[in-house]
Amino acid sequence: MYKILAKRELAPHINLFEFSAGEVSAKTKPGQFVILRIDEDGERIPLTIADADPGKGTIAVACHGVGKTTTQLGRLKEGDFVLDLLGPLGKPARIEKFGTVLCVGGGVMVAPLHFQAKAFREAGNNVIGIVGATTRDHLIFLEEMENTCNHLLVATDDGTKGHKGMDFLKDLIKETKIDRVVAEGPVVMMKAVSDLTRQHGIPTMVNLIPIMVDGMGMCGACRVTVDGKTLFACVDGLEFDGHQVDFDELLARLKVYTPQEKLAYVFSEQGERN
Amino acid sequence: MPKPKIRKEAVPMPKQPPKERADNFREVAIGYSEEQALAEAERCLQCREAPCVKGCPVEVDIPTFIKLIRERRFGEAAMKIKEKNSLPAVCGRVCPQEEQCQAKCTVGRIGEPTSIGRLERFVADWERQHGCEIPQKCPTTGKKVAIVGAGPAGLTVAADLIKLGHEVTIFEALHKPGGVLTYGIPEFRLPKKIVEAEAEYIEKLGVTLKTNALIGRLYTIAELLRQFDAVFIGSGAGPPTFMGIPGENLCGIYSANEYLIRVNLMRSYDFPKAGTPICGGEEVAVVGGGNVAMDSARCALRLGAKDVKIVYRRSREEMPARIEEIENAEEEGIRFEFLTSPKRFIGNERRRVKAMECVRMRLGEPDDSGRRRPVPIEGSNFMVDVDIVIMAVGRTPNPIIKQTTEGLETTKWGGIVTDEDGKTSIEGVYAGGDIVTGESTVISAMGAGRRAARAIHEFLMKKETCARKKRNV
Ligand SMILES: Cc1cc2nc3c(=O)[nH]c(=O)nc-3n(C[C@H](O)[C@H](O)[C@H](O)COP(=O)(O)OP(=O)(O)OC[C@H]3O[C@@H](n4cnc5c(N)ncnc54)[C@H](O)[C@@H]3O)c2cc1C
Ligand SMILES: Cc1cc2nc3c(=O)[nH]c(=O)nc-3n(C[C@H](O)[C@H](O)[C@H](O)COP(=O)(O)OP(=O)(O)OC[C@H]3O[C@@H](n4cnc5c(N)ncnc54)[C@H](O)[C@@H]3O)c2cc1C
Ligand code: SF4
Ligand code: FES
């Protein structure tokens, strides 16, 4: 059993949880993830680690309630427990001194990206951050990113705050010398960023989150095609060369269970009401 | 020798009728009643040289336990088996007895051999229902052993070493112990409550079980060696193999591991009550010919598929699956396409698999394994409609430990190299089971565990003597 020590609402349906997980926190590096299961009937869901404090023995994850399990997690309160928490999983992100690193984050994934941005800054990089979301209310971790990055930009799909859409990126890339791009967020965003940086030959790492089951390389649910080769995101990733990823395959594979997910959500919300 | 007056036919195993069982996940074989067990036990000749024992990889004293059944001393019969085999309820169900003890049985020369497996299962189930004794432990030695993986190999080492007085901690990556017994072999062949009972028994002996602990990431082997006096690695077979043919990553193509983990470990058959979904499919093709393929096909059928076929590149004779399971699958209505191999998969506009192009094979010269090598027949290609494909073409060792353990000698295919006792290239580190041999059987993993436990015990006691000597100097 793993206790929720703190919970903070970052935006509607997006919460930051701090779990007591001493052993995990001591081993966590930016870019890694955990798999948790709320209860005996629960699904194993992966969440990327957004911070780790070995001193306190805690890890933090940000979770966006998009379906059955993430909504269920969103209902838990400080002092509640989850049954299982496995980690840290995946390879740590490559953190080195590259020069200028552009960290592009979208939606809930800005939180774990911040963990990487912090490490890039500590490694001596000039870090430019971009925080994106569909709309103003969904922007998260603005303050944290502001404090961590040398320079911060904001964008929303609907233009309610900061730049409207991602078009401004084109100019930014032309005007600034960028040595490395790290993108973490919705697949379409990571794809768009990779397409753009490919033209300029800027090394671009994307953090892939395909559907997973065990998260330790046993099942192949998470397989992705990178440079024509099949890799398992949970052990070979999460970080991959964005210029080599088959994003269309990933998008299709993320939709495999759409009908079942809807059913599970309705079923569980009904149970919640009764 | 006097002519034995025994029945040639074994007492048949009562089973759920095929039609009925194809719709549920309850156990197929129901198990002998007391009367049936007694009748079957009467068929044993109590041979003095007991050829059956030589056929058993852990040398269970078969004639003695059968004699105890005849005398209705069922609890003692169970204890007798447990002297050599700590998981009889599991082995009675899943061991390939037809190739092991029963293949050697004297009665087999005149009729069907004594049903040793069914009798083993009977006494183990009897004991579970009537409560079992916790065996006496040796005085504590103060030595600590870490075990990686709670599969049959790891559980055996844990049980053996705790009885010898050592302190034992198992680290298991998944949220439940049992290894393949929990995540691979389906409920209808091995009910999970049996595996749970076995794991509980081992915890009752005093073993500490830590789930959600992936060794290599949470702790490295080197770190374990700092806290423990010895380490045993029983991490089993891991990542699934794919064929590397076009279209293999289309939606609807599963590895058998993923399919079985969803069904067994995550209980997808109980979706949406259990949270993990699965795509059941209507026209399912399973590629492969082993136990894993049989289990996948029979799960697909139970999830409601209209048509399930097993596509295997050799012929029936070469199939590595247990005969009993092939027969069960056939009875349930699973079709077999022998001498057939997929060439590529074709998807629809949403990248879901809709068809599979196959080629017919013929058997050529024998290969290294002694089986005749399948060769494609030119121009025999044909299409099969499918909406779910399950690839059961093999698994490789999980690389996480290898990648994070310096100095651990491994083979070309990534298995851990050991001597006969399970000793690896690192002092104090032992290994056994599928991680050493490649995919094998439950009983051979347990046998390896038993040998390693003995070696670890000797290693620890020698260390102790050396330490004492040093202290005395
Ligand atoms: C390695 C990894 C790290 C992740 N990190 C985070 C994180 O830090 N914060 C966070 O909020 N979410 C994260 N996700 C996504 C999160 O795991 C899914 O949202 C969650 O599993 C959905 O479960 P559900 O039952 O609530 O929704 P479901 O009903 O199962 O799905 C609802 C929606 O979420 C999508 N979805 C389902 N599974 C995934 C998945 N594995 N990845 C992406 N989308 C998915 C579905 O396509 C669907 O549209 C991560 C996923 C992976 C694989
Ligand atoms: C579907 C299927 C059906 C089978 N049917 C039969 C049958 O009928 N009869 C038969 O005799 N055999 C059968 N087998 C084979 C048999 O199950 C295996 O040979 C046996 O389970 C091997 O035991 P093991 O202890 O070596 O490994 P496993 O049972 O694989 O257990 C290894 C355990 O280690 C854990 N682990 C792995 N890596 C780590 C790590 N880094 N840290 C912590 N834990 C880790 C895994 O999660 C797992 O729980 C079948 C196998 C499968 C897959
Ligand atoms: S070989 Fe067969 S008949 Fe002889 S002791 Fe063993 S089980 Fe009994
Ligand atoms: S999630 Fe199973 S192999 Fe990656």
Image: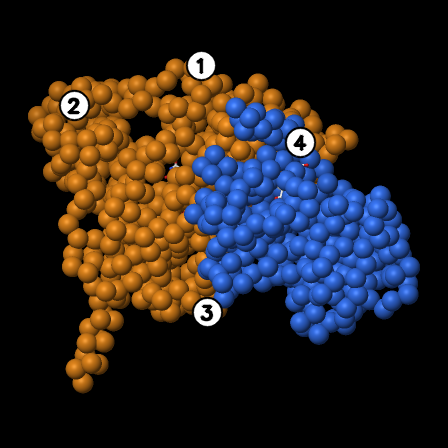
Chain colours: A blue, B orange
Are discs 4 and 2 located on one and the same chain?
Answer: no
Residue at 25% x, 71% y: name it: B463
What residue sits right under mark 4 in the picture? A258
Amino acid at pointer 4: Thr
**On the rendered structure, is A200 left or right of B212?**
right
Q: Quadrant of residue B43?
A: top left
Residue at 85% x, 68% y: name it: A177
Q: Is residue B393 visible?
A: no
Work out whether mark 3 precedes mark 2 in sequence or the reverse, and give the earlier one. 2
Cα distance between the residues tagged 1 and 4? 32 Å
When the figure is inspected, residue A181 is found, relative to residue B62, above or below; the finding is below
Residue at 50% x, 37% y: name it: A42
What residue sits right under mark 1 in the picture? B19
Amino acid at pointer 1: Lys
Q: Is mark 4 within 8 Å of ligand 1?
A: yes
What residue sits right under mark 2 in the picture? B38
Cα distance between the residues tagged 3 and 2? 54 Å
Q: Are marks 3 and 4 in contact (CB under 8 Å)?
A: no
- Subunit bearing disc 4: A
Q: Work out which quarter of the rendered image holds the N terminus of chain B and state it.
A: top left
> Which quadrant of the render holds ligand 2?
top left
* Viewer-closest of B55 and B396: B396
**On the rendered structure, is A38 left or right of B46?**
right
- Subunit bearing disc 3: B
Coordinates of residue B181 in the picture (x, y in percent): 39, 39
- Subunit bearing disc 2: B
Label 3: few (<14), some or many (≥20) within 10 Å? few
Coordinates of residue A99 in the picture (x, y in percent): 77, 72
Work out whether mark 2 precedes mark 1 in sequence or the reverse, and give the earlier one. 1
